[in-house]
Image (tube, coloured by chain):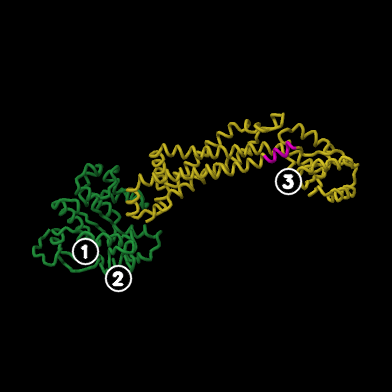
Amino acid sequence: MRFQYLLGQAFANLKRNLLIVFAAVVAVLVMLTLVFGTIVLRWSIDQDIGRWDDNVRVIAFLSDDLALEEIDALQQDIQGWEQVDGIEYFSKAEALDEFRELFADQQSLVDVVEEDPSILPASLRIRPGAAADYSAITDRLVVIPGIREVSAADEAIDALVARSERLRTFAFWIVVVLGGAAVVLIANTIRIAIFARRDEIGIMKLVGAGNWFVRIPFFLEGIMEGFVGAVLAVALVWGVSGSIAELFSTSTDPGALTVPVDFLIRNGLLILGFGAGTGLLGSAFGMWGFLRD
Amino acid sequence: MIRLQEVSKVYDGATVAVSDVSLDIPKGEFVFLVGPSGSGKSTLIRLMLRQELPSEGAIWVAGKQTTKLPSWKVPLLRRSLGTVFQDFKLLPNKTVYENVSFALEVIGRPKHVIRNQVPQVLKLVGLATKADRLPTQLSGGEQQRVSIARAFVNRPLIILADEPTGNLDPATSVGIMRLLDRINRTGTTVVMATHDHAIVDAMRRRVIALERGKVVRDQTRGAYETADEAPGEI
């Protein structure tokens, strides 16, 4: 009965300030739509960047007939080059794992490779000291016998990496600016609700209602505002996630760009929690200095 | 039941509302706090309610030293106190019954207790037949009865009343005083701030007179003024 009462109070508060509650929900909606949209967008870019993570810009694929000692010597040699910052050996088994991951949604390709794992060669992954050094490194690698093929990240990949990083910054500022606005708007709805109920609260305090009994409806109100905004944002981004993923993609295969459902669920839940948290924070700010005895 | 020890209350470091007041009010007593406006009556009531803390001194209410009570325990203290004010403080959108039951609901009393207690106390204050009315449909005296019912429904140890008859005509005030007297006879301590001469003189209870925040007189079976020579009976 008490919980019913608290929830009832929270709903009554929401109904009383419908217009400003609407504004608060929209602020949360816009913020989280942009944040969730950015997450999906970065996912699609990361699909393209894939193995070019960790500043790896040059990959030297090795011949299968190379012995382990020879590879070792080669690695030591390249490590000594002035343009090279770091180098790692990537075995055939690791290559297969990576391939499975990258092409998880294209089972036919995976099947081919699994049938004949020798298709995927071992490789050396090289991090240049400066991004622009990759062409110099490539030029030296291609003439070494035992290296079957050299693949280098071109400027397009560099641009994608930069774009992914810019998106991260963008999402961060979205959270700071719009998140701040959402918290202030929610705090405002809470203040108004407290003001509208000040007589009732005064009497509750006089007859000895517990502090949390007085506060909980306001917390519930804020959490609901944040949560509803988050639910709408998740639904919206989920609905258009395919189009977002295609936005910057270089892939010509549309099948590769279906955002996995488990990715959407995982990040969607995160967004819902984030929305509820925003509401909680807004409530706390709204009650700051109010509702003392 | 209530004890004040060398209590002072100074606002903004300058305005002295209560100055070095020591009082002892035993259980079951009926006490009038009298004095002109600004003499510190309402401040004393607020201090007893722990709506405010004193600048100096210590206060015990219902067995607890309120000056050392952590704020989360204040609600528990308030549950042993009933309060009545000049402006009734009823919720206009709730019926008589709901105004009284509200006081029990928000401290988490079970439903069957509420269904049992509220009609009883409404009967005590003579409003059993008006339980479904809204406060605006009642006279001032009836509204004050509702607020007394709300103050008493949880069977408090103490009733603190700040000018409960301040908005009422003399005839209606007599009715309210009879009610408070009846509640006092159940063993409930009653502390009432007032500047209603007629009531104080008629009741002949303990009178604590305040002037500029100081106790200037503390008299059992007292009158509003020392020179008053026309005591009446209710």
**Which disc is residue A54 wearing?**
3
- For disc 1, the marked residue is B31
Tell me which chain the residue with mark 2 is part of.
Answer: B
Q: Judging from the image, what secondary structure is the residue with disc 2 in? A: strand
Q: Which SS does the magenta portion mostly show?
A: helix
Q: Residues within 10 Å of mark 1 (few under 14, many from 20)?
A: many
- For disc 2, the marked residue is B6
Question: In green, which chain?
Answer: B
Q: Residues within 10 Å of mark 2 (few under 14, many from 20)?
A: some
Instruction: Locate the C terminus of chain A and report the quarter of the image it occupies.
Output: bottom left
From the top left corner, tell me how far across and down residue B115 is, in percent: 31, 48
From the top left corner, tell me how far across and down residue A198 is, in percent: 34, 48
* Nearer to us in this view, B108 or A87: A87
From the top left corner, tell me how far across and down residue B216 is, in percent: 20, 69
Residue A252 figure quarter: top right
From the top left corner, tell me how far across and down residue A24 is, in percent: 46, 40
Label 2 – label 1 distance at C-alpha = 19 Å
Q: Which residues are magenta?
A: A155-162
Label 1 – label 3 distance at C-alpha = 81 Å
Query: Depth-wise, is mark 1 or mark 3 nearer the camera?
Result: 3
